[in-house]
Image (cartoon, grey):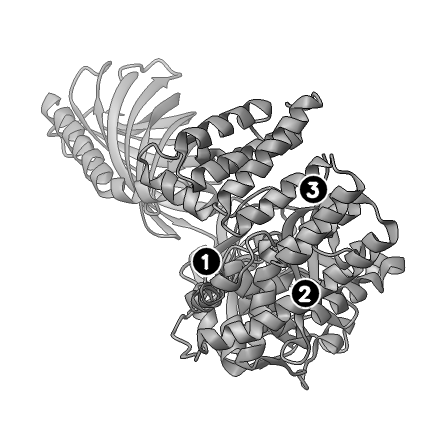
Amino acid sequence: MRASILKNFGLFAFAVILIFTTGFTAWAQSADADLNQYYRFPLSVGAGYRNLQALSGFATGFKVQEFGAEFRVPLPAVPTLQPFLRAGSATWLETGSAGGGQFDHSEAWAALGLSLSTRFTRNFELGVEAAGGLSQTVFNNLNPGAAVGSPGIVAEAGGRIGFVPFYNMAVDIRPSFRYGQSLGPLDEFDGFSFGLGFSVSWRFGEDPDSPASAIRALRLASGKLPPVFAAMQSFYATQPFATVTVLNEERAELRDIEVSFFQPGYMDAPTPVSTLPSLAPNASVEIGILAAFNQEVFRTEGTTPLAGELIIKYRSRGRPAEQRFPVSYELLDRTAISWDDDRKVGAFITPADSALRNYASYVRTSLKSDTLPQLNAPLQTVAQLYAALGRLGIIYQADPSSPFVRAQSGSIAVDSVSLARATLSRGTGDCDDLTVLFASLLESIGIETGFITVPGHIYLAVNTKAAARDYRDLHSDRSMTIVVNDQLWLPVEITLVGKQGFVDAWRRGAELWRLYDGDAAKRGFYATADAQRLYRPVALRESDLGLQYGAREELSAAWKPELARLGDATLTELASMSAKSNDKRDWNTLGIAYARYGRVKDAEAAFNRALRIDPAFTGAQVNLGNLAYMQKDFRKALSSWQAAGKALDAQGKGNSLSAQMILVNVSLAYNALSDFNGARSSFEKAAVIDPERVREFSYLAGVGAGSGASSGRASEQSDSIVFLKDE
């Protein structure tokens, strides 16, 4: 008997090892899924066989074989709990009796029980169970001629190792311990026994993995999406390009909803769109679709019809499900734009284009000798590029199919904006094309730009970096500039390029801006940097444009008349104002303006006019020294500045901001004369007064110390003298 028990235990151990070894990989792959819910079944019917070996209470050895049937009904809400009804018949034969032994008998029994079962892979289950019930034994040989029987109770507990080859069938190995007790006087068979058996059961229900049972809880309200614009590629990665409505048509709540979008050929992987903890029965939700398109969107031309997939994963009644909805839309190439948000034009401004940077740098280098160091640098740069592009033959040409005026008014939905390199190569463009071209060129060399929109039009704005209070440094008319964050911006009507001069374009831009002073809601101002935080520049396929830039002499010939007209536009009105007021400060301001435009004799006359009104006017004295410095007469400049500094000291103004600027100029003069000790000493005195104000001249503290960087910096800044507007 002991050998039989050991044999049963050995078979049991082998079965456990085999099942766990086979199922481990599958368990690791499906550990995050609730397989009990997913593969739950309403009812199973099975039959089984068990061999029992006595552990205690039996006087002799018996061979016990048992056959039974079972009905199992898992609880719908908790399918791991499975009540069952089990009934069967057992035959007890004394060892070697072959059915003729005195105590050979049969036993019929029925029991109710509860099983706790868990499914750890698709094909394997583990469980424990317990049951209790009644039995009836019949001894045919105990009393010859009459059958003797006795009622009893049975209780058992055990385990279940299940193999499920397919959804509707299960094969179980069942080790168990059984206790039986007679309710009559015959108690020879009371006690414990160990059994090892197997069973086969049929499970009713539909396989959730079959196509017929696939969950289709969701419905998409519409599968047609609005068009997408290639130029908005980066925008769509964080902002929805469309919104769809998803409806839960089930009577059960859906949980753990994950939505993604995929476009084959134009995405490297699905883009996560949204996650929802739940969606109530018959409820709907609006979902914005994000799309992380790859660079392939920039290789299309015209309109490309596409069909993408909205992928939704969720759990329904504990079962994981996935639905894929086809959605159709059109992809418009990278020249297309809709004017629902004027900031979108920022995506077409491409400062990283090396062809644009090369051209802008060529213009600046060619005109370096004609550039005035005291005149506002952004103002000169935009005027130089305006003149150069006019010389190159760039002109305005309206787009007959989708001009900005119609697109912005809403009569059509889509406009076309050319990239700067295309406009530069073609030589023509409408207002948005030319705005993009000029802004791209300026941004490529570090000049901050923006764009202005008014009804039916878009044009350029340039940040001069000048403080709002210094508007006369640019133009005597304050209305010629726009103040943004206390900095002065120039509005430039770039459609006049090649037809009228820069001053005309500047004046026209200011007029358009002022036209809507009474209805500011109709105009918009957008800094390119701000727009590109939301609408990043489109990707480029760079190539050599093959442009003929023109000879440097030709560029100079185009620029000098523009510079003269620019000076005339500013200086004529200032001269008139000074003559009318005859105020020393106005004459000093006029002299500074003349000096900025390189008109040294006119500047000298204006400063002397101020000194005739007030011979002690320090500002004019300093500025006369500036003129000497500009003409490379460094000793005369130094003498003039030192005299002005002594005058301020005598007035008790030795620590004033004017005195500080004089000390900076003195340092510059010493540096130009290679008196580096004097240069450093003067700058150190200036820095003591207000170090922040002279930060840009800090290189003067290190001149002559053998530093190549300091020497180079000093050379670059040799003309950056400071004009005084007041004492």
Q: Give percent across and percent down for residue 1.
A: 12, 23
Q: Give percent across and percent down for residue 482.
A: 74, 54
What is the C-alpha distance between the residues marked 2 and 3? 24 Å
Q: Give percent across and percent down for residue 100.
A: 17, 31
Residue corresponding to mark 2 = 566
Foreground residue among 326 and 166: 326
- Crowding around mark 2 (Cα neighbors within 10 Å: few <14, some 14 to 19, many 20+) is many
Looking at numbered disc 2 in the image, what kind of residue is underneath it? Answer: Leu
- Crowding around mark 1 (Cα neighbors within 10 Å: few <14, some 14 to 19, many 20+) is some
Q: Residue furthest right?
A: 518
Q: Does any portion of residue 407 appear in the rendered image?
A: yes
Looking at numbered disc 1 in the image, what kind of residue is underneath it? Answer: Pro
| In this rendering, position of residue 152 left or right of residue 470 | left
Q: Residue at the location (42% across, 57% down)?
A: 209
Residue corresponding to mark 1 = 270
| In this rendering, position of residue 626 left or right of residue 2 | right
Foreground residue among 468 and 556: 556
Q: Secondary structure at mark 3?
A: helix
Q: Residue at the location (49% across, 48% down)?
A: 319
Q: Does any portion of residue 241 appear in the rendered image?
A: no
Residue 620: assigned label: 3
Q: Residue at the location (63% across, 59% down)?
A: 599
